[in-house]
Image (cartoon, rainbow, N blue to C red):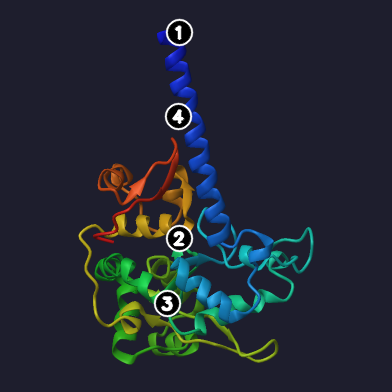
């Protein structure tokens, strides 16, 4: 007959096995859904657009648990051992400029100032946060936003001329406004490998005139990120977006069933999505 200690150890062992199995299942689902396996590599720009629509958001380079456009390409870099642009895919690099021109796609810098492709549906999650940042703008930031609000989307050279600013002054304002989504631009737009042009700068509300509502927009953004990643280290969450995640946000989402902890230190989507 098993002793109480033996039963306890047996129960703990079973729990460990079940935990490991649950994590393995989620990792397999992540590999499939985030196209981390070579046999799931993106082969066309249309597939890349569908990938963004499915996940809701994509980083350009793989730098976190969030799904990545270039990671899903599974193509060798332009130059092995290089840095910067050398690490971009040898031939599919152009997708990083063409994806934003696809229907339902938006290029932002909401990933703490780095490129983040967002589907139109997921953009609505960030809308209250962006509008709050726009309303809080002052100084040159407010002046730039007011100018764009009056004159509409504008090219960089036109903004410098009309505002009487040099490029450095304009860049400083953009560097503050773009990470919080107040300004957006598709940047370089490539029609093909040799024909390109710069897209104009525009306000967020010129892309999304109708405001969206959310009781807890930070929580909604975190939920969207975890859903996109399938499973993510909890410590990774604060690195995703330009706004800080208040203490207790993740615990509140877990209690509400919108997120689950399949193992200590890990997060996955729960069964409830209300309020996102």
State whether residue 241 appears in this view: no
Q: Residue at x 70, y 89 (%)?
A: 194
Q: Residue at x 23, y 64 (%)?
A: 214
Q: Is residue 76 above or below residue 143?
A: above
Left or right, 79 with reference to 206: right
Q: Nearer the viewer, mark 2 or mark 1?
A: 1
Q: Is residue 84 above or below residue 163?
A: above
Q: Are marks 2 and 1 in contact (CB under 8 Å)?
A: no
Task: Determine the CA span between mark 2 and mark 1.
Answer: 48 Å
Give percent across and percent down for residue 73. 65, 68
Task: Determine the CA span between mark 4 and mark 2.
Answer: 27 Å
Q: Are marks 4 and 2 in contact (CB under 8 Å)?
A: no
Q: Nearer the viewer, residue 143 or 7?
A: 7
Q: Nearer the viewer, mark 4 or mark 2?
A: 4
| Mark found first going from the N terminus, 3 or 1 | 1
Q: Nearer the viewer, residue 264 or 66?
A: 264
**Residue ID for mark 1:** 1
**Residue ID for mark 3:** 184
Query: In what quadrant of the picture does the C terminus appear?
Result: bottom left
| Mark found first going from the N terminus, 3 or 2 | 3
Task: Determine the CA span between mark 4 and mark 1.
Answer: 21 Å
Disc 4 crowd rating (10 Å Cα; few below 14, some 14-19, many 20+) is few
Q: Are marks 3 and 1 in contact (CB under 8 Å)?
A: no
């Amino acid at each position: 007959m098993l002793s109480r200690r033996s039963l306890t150890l047996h129960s703990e062992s079973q729990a460990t096995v079940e935990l490991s199995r649950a994590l393995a299942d989620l990792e397999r689902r992540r590999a499939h859904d985030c196209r981390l396996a070579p046999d799931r590599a993106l082969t066309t720009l249309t597939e890349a657009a569908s990938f963004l629509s499915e996940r809701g958001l994509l980083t350009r380079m793989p730098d976190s648990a969030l799904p990545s456009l270039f990671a899903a390409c599974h193509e060798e870099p332009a130059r092995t051992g290089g840095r910067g642009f050398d690490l971009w895919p040898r031939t599919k690099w152009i997708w990083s400029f063409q994806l934003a021109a696809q229907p339902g796609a938006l290029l932002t810098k909401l990933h703490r100032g780095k490129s983040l492709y967002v589907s139109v549906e997921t953009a609505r999650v960030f809308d209250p946060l962006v509008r709050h940042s726009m309303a809080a703008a002052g100084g040159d930031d407010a002046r730039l936003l007011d100018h764009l609000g009056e004159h509409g989307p504008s090219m960089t050279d036109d903004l410098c001329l009309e505002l009487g600013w040099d490029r450095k002054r304009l860049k400083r304002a953009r560097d503050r406004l773009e990470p919080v989504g107040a300004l957006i631009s598709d940047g370089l737009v490539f029609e093909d490998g040799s024909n390109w042009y710069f897209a104009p700068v525009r306000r967020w509300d010129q892309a999304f005139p109708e405001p969206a509502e959310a009781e807890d927009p930070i929580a909604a953004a975190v939920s969207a990120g975890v859903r996109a990643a399938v499973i993510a280290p909890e410590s990774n969450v604060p690195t995703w977006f330009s706004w800080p995640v208040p203490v207790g946000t993740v615990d509140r989402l877990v209690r509400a069933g919108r997120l689950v902890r399949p193992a200590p230190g890990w997060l996955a989507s729960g069964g409830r999505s209300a309020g996102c």
